[in-house]
Amino acid sequence: MHTEFLMGNEAIALGALAAGVNVVAGYPGTPSTEVLETVARRRSQDVYVEWSINEKAAMEVAAGAAYSGARALVTCKQVGLNVASDPLMSLEYIGVKGGLVVMVADDPGPISSQTEQDTRTFAQFSKLPCFDPSSVAEAYEMVQDAFELSERLGTPVFFRATTRVDHGYESIQVADEEEWLHNDPEGFVRDPSRWVIFPRLSVVNHAKIEARNAQLSDELSDYRRNFVLPETDGAPRKGIATHGINYAYVRENLGEDDHVRVLRVATPHPFPERLAVEFLQDLDEVLCVEELDPVLERALTYVCGKHDLPVRIRGKLTGDIAPSGENTVESVGAAIDAFLGVDRQELPAPAMPTLPVRPPVLCAGCPHRASFYAVKKAMKGRKTIYCGDIGCYTLGNAAPLDMVDTCLCMGAGINIAQGVFHTEPDTSCFAFVGDSTFFASGITGTINAFYNQADMTLVVLDNSTTAMTGHQPHPGTGRTMMGEVVQKVSIEAILRAIGLTVVETVDPLDLELAVQTVRRVADEPGVKAIIFKSPCVVLARPQAHSHVDGERCVGCQRCVRELGCPALVPTDGKVVIDESLCSGCTLCEQVCPFGAIGGGRRIDMELPQAGGRA
Amino acid sequence: MSTNIILCGVGGQGTILASKLIASAAMARDIPVKTAETIGMAQRGGSVFSHVRLGEGIASPLMARGTADLILAFEPAEAVRQLAFLKPGGRVVVSSRPVVPVSSMTGGPAYDLEALMGYLHAQVGERLVVVDSDAAAADLGSAKCLNVVLLGAAARTGALGLSTDDLLAAIHGRLPERLWDLNERALSYA
Ligand SMILES: Cc1ncc(C[n+]2csc(CCOP(=O)(O)OP(=O)(O)O)c2C)c(N)n1
Ligand code: SF4
């Protein structure tokens, strides 16, 4: 064993490696991404790791590996689980041979996600056992417990953590590589009665799953990570039930002389019912401190009803804990004080000056800015809808670009544009999709629109990376997580193979050409595509910076108002360029009506092979 | 004994590396460390913060408002945004250089540097250290080591509970050798 200062996600990866994981597949998504990246960095030679094309593919790769006796890990964010849910729901009925852990990162807040869904609820729905760690150290240990349980029971198991555990850091004890378990998969053993799902098999296995979960609830009541904190003195009348990072917030707030009993639930499903009954004995009231869904609150309310216990269960459903959003040390402290009847002294907040708002923005020199600007210019005065999608380019919604009318979930923009077209055919419908998003879930949508005779323009924003989540490779980049350089999959070839006849690839930083191309392509009939190809500036080294000629700049600030590039800074009635940010993309040079900006140089279309992280 | 530190700034300014250097320096002295970082969308030029908690008996990586011994701010407006976390008597080290968001130039609330700095002086008084980061960048020949300049200033206030030597050892442990000289000069820049 040795000590390392680790991010929660790194600890999860090392825990999986220590448990002898053989195959790891995932699709990036905050706050889950670093798990797979750490596996790739720290794995031993015989561990296979891939960024799959999407979460469904990752789940299926892991299922095949686990059928063959391998220990397999899937990583994704909570909305990624929605994409993987079709194989996973059926997989629960079939089961696995090698341990299969599905690591899902939930995101209360949400800080970097579309939804506040709770994988604990998904565990109840899908009937999978679920682990929910409270700290980095626990995450490391519990992922190993998850593999053990999965393999012993032959079921996939959820390992869900939330952002503050995933992205928290702690110095913890971890095993040396020599201490890692070694798992030699037996290989796939042919047995259609086991591996081929049919209604007859499903009904039999369903009954087995229900029986197993009832038995598992009892077993998990003795799991050492589900516990009731020892009472201090006397018999408390009040209790707190909590989970995950909220357990840390509860501990920060409880003093020596607070007479409360605490239940910490590490396995929300199956719920450790017997332990809960012990916890509830002689209590009058329980406050459930949880984030996302009121999972513990509902479970305890049910247990009280079933066991006829006169305990009042409070939490989200009773308005004692906020129904949505992230909890904090203070919000939990305030809720506990109110619950215990303690007066809380609020620090008076002195009046603050007006703060600037600082939402995330496209980087200086981001090619997406140029793409949006070109379409905006080309379509000025026409009736349009701009369906956006998920990625850095969602940030094209902000002023001054204001070029994202819709955004729902990955890949949805294409068929949303199609739906708008079928409703108002006189609108020029655009769908913007990133390259990674196109591979993940844009291809079927494009075929749907093409085959069903839509009239729309597909704009693929090809920056040769999955930028938003930290620059992962995808099939268009020709690099794999095993470190191989492989044949790239061409987006243009895919579009042509579908049958599109108008597919134009343009550098968006060549503004005039880009605008002309959009004008021309938008007027073609049917589904047609423009691929705006230019590398993400975070990966490409700037070749020169632009600068403003102070003599020529008249201070009209048109560049600032049209582009909103963070490198353009209004200063003393004129504009200067912040060289530390400027990538020399030349877009502002092409926009300035007075030719006052020069010196930049566009980055070549071809990316260097080396990757990097934002 | 525990020390609570908040680092804050704008995505891309290097707050994460700074918090890692503090953590490494503390660990080298066998002080337990817990931190929480902003990772994700906000890294694209949004407001970012790190909570760094050093010492025994800490349960949560995030601290409560009114409990920070030190706020290390890479940007004046972000110092103001996080100020509620400062405990009475706590210190603030702030970079003088504003990063004006695009929103302030395109119709959002204006960036009023004078009002923000005035507020910091009024609230924090003599426990405020303002680092002239433009001068530091010019003198050091690089704006890239602002994080280490700020760390040096923070260490000299005593509020970190770590010395510049502790930090220097952490720099040697975490950064490639070609960056040592620049960062050593940044650390002792005053
Ligand atoms: C189902 C699902 N999986 C993963 C994510 C996380 N995610 C957000 S943006 C993105 C990819 C963006 O890549 P790309 O389309 O290439 O656009 P870029 O950020 O490079 O502009 C991913 C994977 C998500 N939001 N939904
Ligand atoms: S990371 Fe790349 S794609 Fe994302 S905003 Fe910055 S330049 Fe654009």
Image (cartoon, coloured by chain):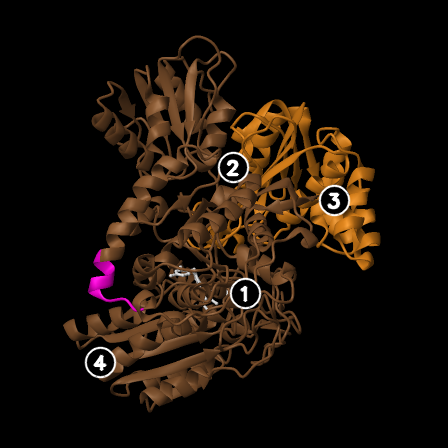
Chain colours: A brown, B orange
Residue A156 seen in this snapshot? yes
Q: Residue at x 47, y 78 (%)?
A: A508
> What is the chain letter for disc 1?
A
Foreground label between 2 and 1: 1
Q: Is the same chain shared between marks 2 and 1? A: no
Foreground label between 4 and 1: 1
Counting from the top left corner in percent of width and height, residue B70 is at 64, 31
Query: To which residue does mark 1 refer?
Result: A471
**Which quadrant would residue A445 be assigned to in this image?**
bottom left
**What is the magenta range?**
A196-203
- The mark that comes first in sequence, 4 or 1, is 4
Amino acid type for the residue under numbered disc 3? Val
Query: To which residue does mark 4 refer?
Result: A454
Asked if residue A80 lies in the magenta stretch, the reply is no
Q: Secondary structure at mark 2?
A: helix
Query: To which residue does mark 3 refer?
Result: B149
Q: Residue at x 25, y 79 (%)?
A: A449
Amino acid type for the residue under numbered disc 4? Ala
Ligand 1's image quarter is bottom left
Counting from the top left corner in percent of width and height, residue B73 is at 62, 40
Could you give the CA–CA distance between mark 3 and mark 2, rounded to whole angstroms?
21 Å
Residue lying furthest top in this view?
A234
- Binning the other alpha carbons within 10 Å of mark 3 as few (below 14), some (14 to 19) or many (20 upward) gives many
> What is the chain letter for disc 3?
B
Amino acid type for the residue under numbered disc 2? Arg
Residue lying furthest bottom in this view?
A501
Ligand 2 within 8 angstroms of badge 1 C-beta: yes
> What is the chain letter for disc 4?
A
Foreground label between 2 and 4: 4
